[in-house]
Image (cartoon, coloured by chain):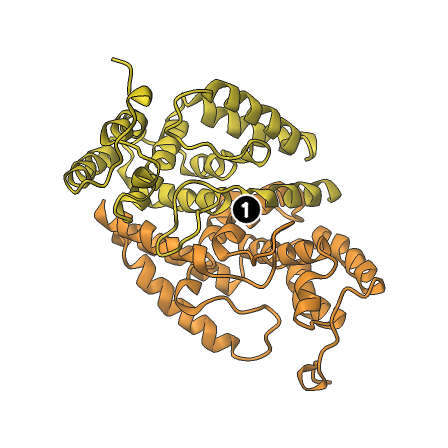
Chain colours: A yellow, B orange
């Protein structure tokens, strides 16, 4: 029991990991703990729109643990162009440490969920990725561009970065978002990226 | 799809509902969204200690939605002595409104989970209540008394208020906490309640 208590107090720190998007009507950035909660419910609400049968409960469990590595590494904006592999390796080390605090069978089950999300090969993991990618898009669309304007992210960069994963995991969601992103582009809700961070041709 | 998007942006407001407990190492109060995330994982980690077989996934889903009514009502400290019935009725009205934003079958499924938690008759609902009650206890134990001291809550009041629900839902968890609460009492981590809010004899 003490192992479980130590684990649950350790993961409390995810409440202190801030992301680059702001909740509706709040000035502060959202944190990765409340984000994880929201996308778990987003997955549950969106499940009828999945294009193939899936185990929603495994999607939910994956989403609840997928950001825990950030306790040691912090969050990185999805539009960063470099260092993804190194960060993911560091997150893997972090979750091994954190899940290692639990009794062996529980720890291994959690690590299995984390790995399944990262590898992104199962229907459930791909659906989970779609939901994770789509949520900040919805918050930014609801906030006149939000972090895209704030951090100078272009329309092309957003579509290129989040489109394939959302489309692969939940095509119906991407069909909806694609149109909303075009509308947002017409309203100039995106930033202009500097030439040296543009997509290589 | 637009209904689901409206729903997920509506529930974003739970990130702004503050509770009376502070996360580990942070000065701010925790909010009900990150709390819901944490107890969902607490339930998952604690499940091997359940005293009877249960559907963990239904526990997790219940915990993810159980506080959504607070979007309209705000959070009330668990040690409040009056007005519980009225607040619960107001929360029920709130979740009917919020789940009513979804397509009918999804909305009804979510409302069913919320009701199951409130009625607290199933094994899953009782386990969920135990986890929900225990989490702030663990945070306060980790913070030298935390909100008990800050809000003048006595040892007797804590044991009386959270003990029966935790014991009913997860006896092993209560056996652990009971001892920790005695230790905390010896360290004077509780407040002294005013006579007019003491337990009626």
* Residue at 55% over, 20% down: A89
Residue A14 picture quarter: top right
Give percent across and percent down for residue A52: 29, 30
Give percent across and percent down for residue B24: 64, 50
Q: Residues within 10 Å of mark 1 (few under 14, many from 20)?
A: many
Give percent across and percent down for residue A73: 56, 31
Between residues B101 and B35, which one lies in front from this camera angle? B35
Give percent across and percent down for residue B31: 51, 56
Q: Give the residue pinned by disc 1.
A: A15
Quadrant containing the N terminus of chain B is top left
Residue A47 visible somewhere in the drawing: no
* Residue at 81% over, 64% down: B185
Quadrant containing the C terminus of chain B is bottom right
Label 1, secondary structure: give it. Answer: helix
Q: Is residue B176 left or right of residue B10?
A: right
- Residue A76 vs B66, above or below: the answer is above
* Residue at 62% over, 43% down: B47
Q: Is residue A36 left or right of residue B186?
A: left
Between residues B133 and B189, which one lies in front from this camera angle? B189
């Amino acid at each position: 029991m003490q192992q479980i208590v130590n684990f649950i107090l350790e993961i409390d720190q995810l409440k202190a990991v801030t992301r680059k998007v702001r909740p509706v009507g709040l000035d502060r950035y959202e944190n990765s703990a409340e984000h994880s909660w929201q996308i778990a419910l987003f997955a549950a609400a969106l499940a009828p729109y999945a294009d193939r049968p899936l185990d929603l409960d495994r999607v939910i469990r994956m989403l609840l643990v997928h950001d825990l590595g950030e306790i040691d590494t912090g969050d990185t904006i999805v539009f960063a162009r470099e260092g993804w592999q190194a960060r993911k390796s560091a997150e893997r080390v972090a979750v091994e440490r954190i899940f290692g605090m639990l009794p062996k069978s529980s720890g291994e089950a959690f690590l299995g969920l984390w790995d399944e999300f990262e590898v992104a090969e199962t229907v459930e993991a791909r659906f989970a990725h779609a939901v994770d990618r789509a949520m900040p898009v919805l918050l930014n669309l609801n906030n006149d561009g939000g972090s895209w304007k704030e951090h100078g992210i272009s329309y092309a960069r957003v579509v290129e970065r989040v489109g394939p994963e959302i489309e692969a995991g939940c095509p119906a969601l991407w069909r909806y978002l694609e149109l909303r992103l075009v509308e947002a582009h017409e309203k100039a809700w995106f930033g202009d990226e500097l030439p040296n961070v543009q997509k290589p041709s």
